[in-house]
Amino acid sequence: MIKALTEALFYNVPMAISTDQVVLNLQKHFSNVEGNKTREVGLSLYGLFAVLGGPFFFLASPKMRQTLINRRLRRSRIDVFQDMARTKGVILAGYYGHWEKGDEEENFDNPVYQRMKYELPGQRDRSGPGEKPVVRETRRDLKPTVFVGHDAVPEETDVIVIGSGAGGAVAAASVADEGHEVLIIEAGSNYPSARITHEEARMTAKLFKQGGLQTTSDRDIMVFQGHVVGGSTVINNGICLRMKHEGLVHPDAEDVYETWASMGAPISEAELAKSYEAVEQSLEVSEIDPISGRNNGPHLIEGWKKYAAQSTDPMDKKAITAWFQKNYGPNTPDSECVYCGYCNTGCPYGRKKAMPESFLTHATSDDREKPARILDRAEATEIIWGEGANGKRIAEAVKITLRDGRKRTVRVREGVVVAAGALASSNLLIASGIERSGRNISLNIACPVVALMPEDRKMNVWNEDQMATYVDRGDYLIESHFQPPMTMAMLVPGWFEEHFQRMLNYNRLASAGVLFPADRLGYMENGKLQLKIGEPELALLRRALAAMTKVHFLNGALEVYPALLKGQTLRRDMSDAEIDAFYEENIKEPDDVVLSSSHPHGGNAINEDPEKGIVDLNQRVHGTTNCYVTDASVMPSCIRVNAQLTTMAMSHRAMAGKRRFG
């Protein structure tokens, strides 16, 4: 089936590798993905087999197969067929994710890259003024001695921290600072920069939850989360935005602190500001160097300024345009970002100060009397409770399943911190008897808009930081972004020869994505995220995509390719009214457009009232004495901006210097 689909999708185009090689690439890719997701993809292929005509699809010519795909998938309004149409991305990954056996140098002549005129970081000319040489630095990698072997799992410890990402790592460092013995449990494996390569398919399979194929239960929205020591901080772009920050956040945007207070979660803005400052100082957060986003970054800002200048909407006029603040510090030759463009599959150069290079290193330092230790490839499945005073529960132990299926139970002398991420923490608490967990989950949803620039404006955006600048419009954000070939191929819309030609123009593409809130629309059911966006969110999406399209055209784009399932093209001779009408006509439901999120939050909301939230103002689970939640799941509503920094600050606020245990 994979071969037949490949022959159809690439019919009449000069492929750089054979269809058989695409099949081999995908077999290799799926062998690296853990869990049941590959079985789900396999079932989708069986479904496609039936929908596309059964045995006739194999017997038909590739051209006839294209006709069947066009009729039954690309143009369909039936939800299940639209979901099947997304399987196209799997085939594209098999082609554009091609990797010759070996490391980076063995792929300098990778035929797919050669056809696209794409250069790997080690090939790039960095001899110009201000350029940063591409050099690996692995000195920040966690030492092997900080890890607990699966045959040496302790029977007891002071505190267990479940999760090693933004919330868990900060909590672990804070608890360890108070002299407690800490065991950090992480479901993913350890992938230090020394092990990270530029092989997109392998890194996606190894570092992402469900190999980067996790979706909401109805498959309308991709949900990207890290499945690795360090969590999503390893596979994100290091963006550090506060919920409220003068000069960096739209002045008329929702005041999240006021919203939370009205809901029963009065978090002190001054208190959280101190935690923001402490985290930013630890991570040496600073504005990125403009050379790292020299083309795609200014393209967004300059285009927006032209758009705002002709707009009569005060929200457009007041919009913030800025370069991102990131945790790439300090700006020294052995630490500064080398803008390779591979942030989302881990930093191979050891430059980003993700959790392994910062708070986890601090927590596990041998300089302390009781250094924290990390048990990776181990999933916490249940918290065991005892009976405490006043009928409150006491966390006494955590049940763990190791990667090979063995079960362990580790007792705790003092307490448990839950920080496995909004979805996994909710599932764990539900399994532990916190029945109302997993409600009111929010997403910041992203949707890309790609543009073709003139021939004399080759952008070469792949030789830059993936995300450099942003526009905060108040009700939505626009963020510049670009991806290496495999991931970019799945973001660039279009079918057949048209998609192939767009990828041949890879060097001329500019790209940005709109980011809009889906506030408290989701909940966990049977371990999966149920979330359906409605007309209010779709109306905002249409307006944001129309604005970004106009921004592209105002800054010189010839064509714009919004991430619609049908892959339509918008051209620069279209009027503003025609652009608006296009989106009104073509986005009727979520299945019409490609949506993703890397920012799930909520599910275990803070609230003074135990009937309205899961944790109290100190982030302790209501009705318990020694169980805290310190990840993004405690956020009562959508925070609208990238969630990494706020997750860390909330964890710091809850745990640092508070002596919650002992």
Image (cartoon, rainbow, N blue to C red):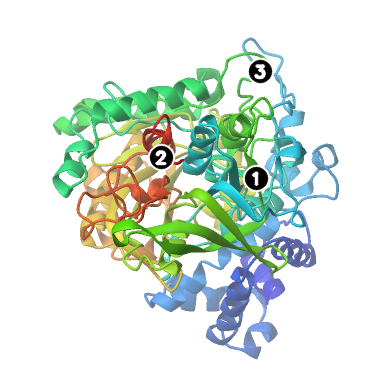
Q: Nearer the viewer, mark 3 or mark 2?
A: 2
Neighbour class for label 2 at 10 Å: few (<14), some, many (≥20)? some
Amino acid, disc 2: Arg
- Residues marked 1 and 2 touching at CB (< 8 Å): no
Tag in front: 1 or 2? 2
Q: Depth check: 523 or 311 in front?
A: 523
Secondary structure state at the residue bearing disc 1: strand
Q: Residues within 10 Å of mark 3 (few under 14, many from 20)?
A: some
Q: Residue at x 70, y 68 (%)?
A: 406
> From mark 3 to mark 2, how far is it between C-alphas?
44 Å
Q: Which mark is residue 197?
A: none
Residue 307: x and y, percent? 27, 31
x and y percentages locating residue 612 in the rendered image: 21, 58
Find disc 2 in the rendering and name its residue: 660
Residue 445 visible from this viewpoint:
no
> CB atoms at circles 3 and 2 under 8 Å apart?
no
Q: Which residue is mark 3?
A: 132
* Amino acid marked by disc 1: Ile
Give the mark, 3 or 1, whose residue is nearer the N terminus.
Answer: 3
Answer with the quarter of the image where residue 213 lies: bottom right
Q: Amino acid at mark 3?
A: Lys
Residue 298 location in percent, x, y? 44, 24
In the shown orientation, is residue 660 left or right of residue 229?
left
Q: Residue at x 73, y 57 (%)?
A: 15
Q: Which residue is mark 1?
A: 374
Q: Which of labels 3 and 1 is toward the front?
A: 1
The answer to whether residue 155 is above or below residue 231 is below
Q: Residue at x 44, y 66 (%)?
A: 432
Q: Could you tell whether 460 is left or right of 59 in the image?
A: left
Classed neighbour count for the residue bearing mark 1: other residues with Cα under 10 Å, few (<14), some (14–19), many (≥20): many
How far is the residue under mark 3 from the one under mark 1?
Answer: 34 Å
Cα–Cα gap, marks 1 and 2: 21 Å
